[in-house]
Amino acid sequence: MANSNFSIAYQPNPPSVPDWLSKGDNAWQLTAATLVGLQSMPGLVVLYGSIVKKKWAVNSAFMALYAFASSLIVWVLVGYKMAFGERLLPFWGKAGVALSEGYLIKRAAFPATEHHFSNGSIQTPMTEPFYPQATLVYFQFMFAAITLILLAGSVLGRMNIKAWMLFAPLWLMCSYTVGAFSLWGGGFLYHWGVIDYAGGYVIHLASGVAGFTAAYWVGPRAKTDRERFSPNNILLMLTGAGMLWLGWSGFNGGAPYAANITASIAILNTHICAATSLLMWTLLDVIFFGKPSVIGAVQGMMTGLVCITPAAGFVHAWSAMLMGIFSGSVPWFTMMILHKKSSLLQKVDDTLAVFHTHAVAGLLGGLLAGLLAVPELTSFALPIPSEKGTVYGGGIMQILKQIGGALFIIVWNVFSTTVILFVVGFFIPLRMTDDQLMIGDDAAHGEEAYALWGDGEKFDATRHETMVSNVNGNEETVMSQRLNNISARGVTIQL
């Protein structure tokens, strides 16, 4: 009788807390998912809007915002089950909606993850976290959304926004879900034993390769933008970068699907690797260029976070520091040295160097995971308990598995991204017109990031005659000179 005075939520054994539910795991998984969400919204929205030229701030931020929103609708309608549902093909799950109450309140499960011995007996049971399916759908959506937003970094400053609005949901559905199912959802790479703790391949290698492919087909920015693309607000860029770094605690800490030892190890390793990588990148900038670069430090931070991701819960802390040294130097070398010697890398206009910071760093992390994974830690989470890095007796086979997994992700993303862009390009031009590229945000959205021409007044480059007089030449030259004269002066930084 006394219990009737209390809300049903606080009654002993309330119906909303079934026996299989772990309140701690559920609370942590929802928190981790939200931390990953904050990396995108507002983290990458802020970072993209500030790291680009002023005239592209609105467009860049909106591309990230749109990708986040559209991803959720695609995810609950078809994407989640294609990535984590029942097996349809060795690399793809069966499409289906994840919206019904009956489905979302039952215990979370990955139906294709049950792993068998060669004789057919069960070696590792199906993965079933101790919280409802709704929590898992929410958590995995955040991973899908940030992958698409990272890809967008390669095509900022020239992709037709209408083409992006069509491309984004198609890529998530036809490309991301394949990698997620193959490596995490119970596909052939998962059962083969490829190690990808939290997305070095599924997220970063995929976004880097797909972004590079998209940049190739969309085409380059305007010549003036390629030559001079200084950030419009470095301090705000650092704010976005800080959200990205701290949010990675949820990124790697949520990957074991529980508030357990693996999560603790992963979070500590994440920050050790990121800090080491940032310092290594900065040191190389000082040695070769005579001064530290703030943008370089952010890139070093990013490559460290990316590199540790496929191994975060499976390696020693000293290994995380070693990985930070590699992630702060190998991508630095490919970006600063190799890029200038490769005609292909110079031809493809990868706006934010996503290929170097994500594809190269993600591949590097995957290979190092195959070398340095500790058997005591892999036994907590991998479907094959005996899996371990080459250094700890895993032999050359584990490295071959890592290479094989990477090749699959690379080939699939080149193929799928190309096909999707050809389909989209048949209906909508992939690249803005040259006239639109000269103007930027005002041409794409009718909006600008900063009201520098009065309280809310939009800047129309064809109407303002300030600062330029007696200019001889054709209309395009006049327009270019006007824009150059009224733009803020800054340091030219090559990304």
Image (cartoon, grey):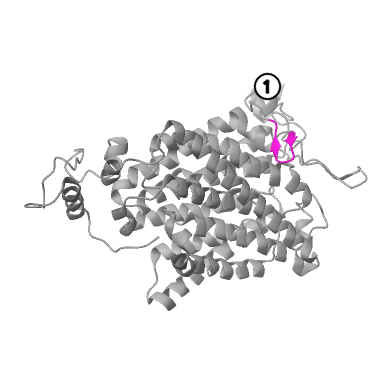
Judge left or right: residue 225 versus residue 154: left
91 in magenta: yes
The residue lying at 58 percent from left, 44 percent from top is: 415
Dot 1 surroundings within 10 Å: few (below 14), some, or many (20 or more)? few
Q: Residue at x 40, y 60 (%)?
A: 495
Q: Which residues are magenta?
A: 87-94
**Residue bearing mark 1:** 4
Kind of residue sitting beneath label 1? Ser
Expressed as whole percent of the image width and height from the top left, the position of residue 158 reads 37, 45
Which residue is more in the foreground, 331 or 138? 331
Q: Main secondary structure of the magenta part?
A: strand
Side of 253 where 491 appears, left or right: left
- Describe the element under mark 1 as helix, strand or loop: helix
Tell me where residue 14 appears, x and y as whole percent: 71, 28
Q: Residue at x 91, y 42 (%)?
A: 120
Residue at 40 percent across and 34 percent down: it is 162
Q: Using the image as rendered, state which of residue 259 and residue 328 is in the foreground.
A: 328
Whole-percent x, y for residue 196 in the image? 68, 53
Up/down of 375 relative to 83, above or below = below
Residue lying at the far right of the rendered structure: 119
Q: Is residue 447 above or below residue 333?
A: above
Magenta region includes residue 391:
no
From this view, report whether residue 308 is shown above or below residue 16.
below
Image quadrant in which the N terminus is located: top right
